[in-house]
Amino acid sequence: MNQDSIPLSNDALSGATTHRHLCFGWWSLLCFLSLGIVLETLHGFKIGWYLDVAHSTRRLMWTLAHAHGVLLSLVHLAFGFTLPLLPNVRVRWRRIVSSSLIGASFFLPGGFFLGGVVIYDGDPGLGILLVPVGALLLFVAVLLIARRVNYVGESPSSSGVKNLGLEEKSGSAIGKRQGRRHRR
Amino acid sequence: MSRASFLFASCEKGRAGFRMKGKMKYLGGCAFIGYKVTGCLWMRCLFLVALGIGLMVMGSGCSESSFGLKQKKELGRGRPIAVPADKYISSGTCRSCHPSNYASWYGSFHRTMTQVANSSTVVAPIGKEFSFLGETSRLKVRGGDVWFQMDASPSRRHPVEMRLSMITGSHHMQVYWYSIGQGRKLGQIPFIYLIQEDEWIPRGASFLSPPKPGLQTALPGAWNMACIKCHTTQGKPRSPNWGSPNLPMTDFSFDSRVAEFGIACEACHGPGEDHVRVNRDPIRRYRYHLDEGADETIVHPARLSHEASSQVCGQCHGVMEFYDKEGFEEWMNYGYPYRPGDVLSETKLVVQFDDKEHPRVRSLVRQNPEFWKQKFWSDGMVRVSGREYNGLIESPCFQEGELSCLSCHSMHKSLDDPRPLSLWAVDQLKPKMDGDQACLQCHKSFRQNVSEHTHHKAQSTGSRCYNCHMPYTTYGLLKAIRSHQIDIPTVAASLKTGRPNACNQCHLDKTLEWAAAYMEDWYGQSKPELNREQQSVAASLLWLLRGDAGQRALMAWSMGWQSARQVSGADWMPPFLGQLLEDPYDAVRFIAARSLRQSKAFAKIEYKFFGSPEKRAVSHQQVLNSWNALPLPRNQSGREELLIDHAGRVRGELFNRLLLQRDDQLVSLAE
């Protein structure tokens, strides 16, 4: 068997995903922070097509693009730090979450930005249609992550419990929940 | 406790949520309980979804009221209130979708035509005292309100205090109103504040009207019956006393309401409720964004025919009357039925000179024999400000072309207009419409060689289309305003009507004979017969010395018009303006003093136009003495047409002879 064709272990794949999201997070953070600097420069030089009342929709859209881009960058970083703490994640789960997060990072801030390029007075341009797509992708990704974290917390046998510092203690919330389940 | 009984208990709590209001709260209640009890993921999701839907529903409920679809009742204290009704929703609703247009409107003087009085809307200085006829007054701020105070005086033992409630105007002058107490009836304080001059004047002096002793004020309820017509959007006087046979109108109480103070979005675009409602749908909105078609749920005056779009402005900027008593009563209770896009004449009588035989007009003239003189020159050209529509519709450019108000003016500053908002707001002219382009956009044949047509140098005042075809022959706001009836200047019209012609209004030092000769030579106009004085004395002096008060006011203003002063020289003017310092009409004296102060030697003249006749005479004499003391050649000596002899003095005999011929008929211009 060729060395190159040996399939990577799940842990290795998780590590690759972690690396990808950490890289993506930091680079997109740089990108959207730069956008923020550009927007402040437009403020500083009082550029009419950004600051005039007639262009208030553009200003709103690009501000939202900057804010959402930065926040999503942080979400990527958070995911990158969270993923190693989640043991035995399925490949399919990892692919869905990863692609959803990356997709959201393009569609959400991208939609806002494109929606500000061409505006119709109080309405953004057609690029805004990308925003709900991005929002949905983000929702899916975060939901899946939240479920996974919750599952790890409720499974005492999982090594993830120790990783998360959720060891059994008397009177702990997890212990109580486990106890109620047993009594039923 | 069994699982079933626990779920039942949860449902009970859920039913409590349903009793509160709405299925959403029930759903949210159950989901929340499920979340807490079961810890099940899908219940948690359901809770989140219900919360989100609930928030959306509440949000749309908030936006429902913010769109003005429900009536918002202000609690104005004894003053008219703004209550959007009849599908009017107010300009605040327009703002979110039309921020640019809202901003330009907000910066216009249309918005501030009527405002609620407070310390930020009152422009007059607070605390500064002013005195007229022994009455000392001031404005004061107390408890967030602005108060007008008049001290006790020999004629009035007790001081007077009135809390200002409303303001009219913000461009040239402000008029202040207070609550009288009969419902929402307003009274007017007896002074008006002139903004540019930073000066208070008695209210009576702001109009060109026959002199009356003492301080004048508008009749109680004048705002509720007159000003509300045009200075608000969809105003309704609403008086429960209308129709009372034995009660004079001045004793009526009022419950006046408007859709919005000032001339707001819906005054020109029509009620916006339907437009807002249907455009909540983003698909509909974007369909109109992309194909740029007309949205039939709102009126766009620029898309109307030139007649219809001019009527949108004309509903206020015209001489209008009701057709009959029923129309008047309908307006009293429900406001004008006219909506932008309608045919104006179906609901309002647009009074023109040709309508003299109309029964309603004849009725008006019977009630007021001076009706025509108060608003029109004798040939039917409108002569007061704020009635531009009447002039426009008599213009050949309107009747044979497609001229409309929007050919030159715009209600919103365009995005590519480099002027600051404050400059645009002065006349709301479109870019380049303050020059010849306004006319040359249609009269392209003159574009190549204007001088050939005007017989004046290309860049001179005499080559400006406006100056010949829209001269300053309309009076209002203590100044002359361009006539909006586009016309050809003729000496014959001046002889017939007394209206200054464009030539003599600029060439103030020239005679009618001089103007007639050039008009004959250049344009083939037949020369009218002129008497000796019309041949030998400058036309401006004939109008100034022996014209009626309206003519004198126009001449007083023209002598302060920089273009005319440059063309005809200004050194000879002071003695004649000095004469007007003693004019019986307050407005004429005011304008004359303002024009006189344009000359450096008289810039600091001590003169109060409302002073006693004796003091005015003293000021007049001082002007004459100062002028006589000025070194030659101050006065173009030896110019007989200017009544100046070779010694450089005014020819007193001729001067007084002309003055004795002054037309002292009472003039009251109803601007």
Image: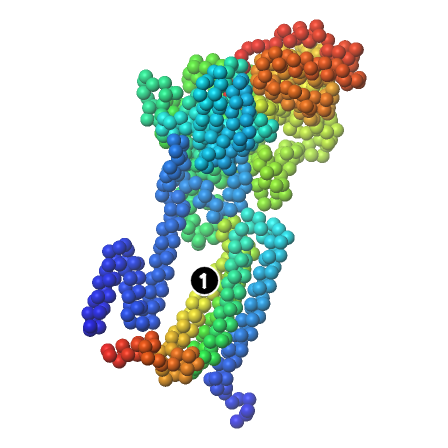
Judging depth in this view, the residue of B234 and B196 nearest the camera is B196
Q: Position of residue B37 (x, y in %)?
A: 28, 70
Observer-nearest of B447 and B47: B47
Residue at mark 1:
A132
In the image, is A55 to the left or to the right of B162?
right
Residue A123's x, y, as percent?
49, 52
Task: Give the residue at x 46% y 34%.
Answer: B142
**In terms of secondary structure, where does tag 1 sit?**
helix
Residue in the image at 64% along x and 23% along y: B594
Q: Is residue A78 above or below residue B169?
A: below
Identified at 31% across, 72% down, the residue is: B40
The residue positioned farthest toward the bottom in the image shown: A1
Q: Residues within 10 Å of mark 1 (few under 14, many from 20)?
A: some
Q: Position of residue B97 (x, y in %)?
A: 48, 48
Q: Is residue B262 visible?
A: no
Instruction: Quadrant for residue A97, please give it.
Output: bottom left
Vertical relation: B11 (above or below) A18: above
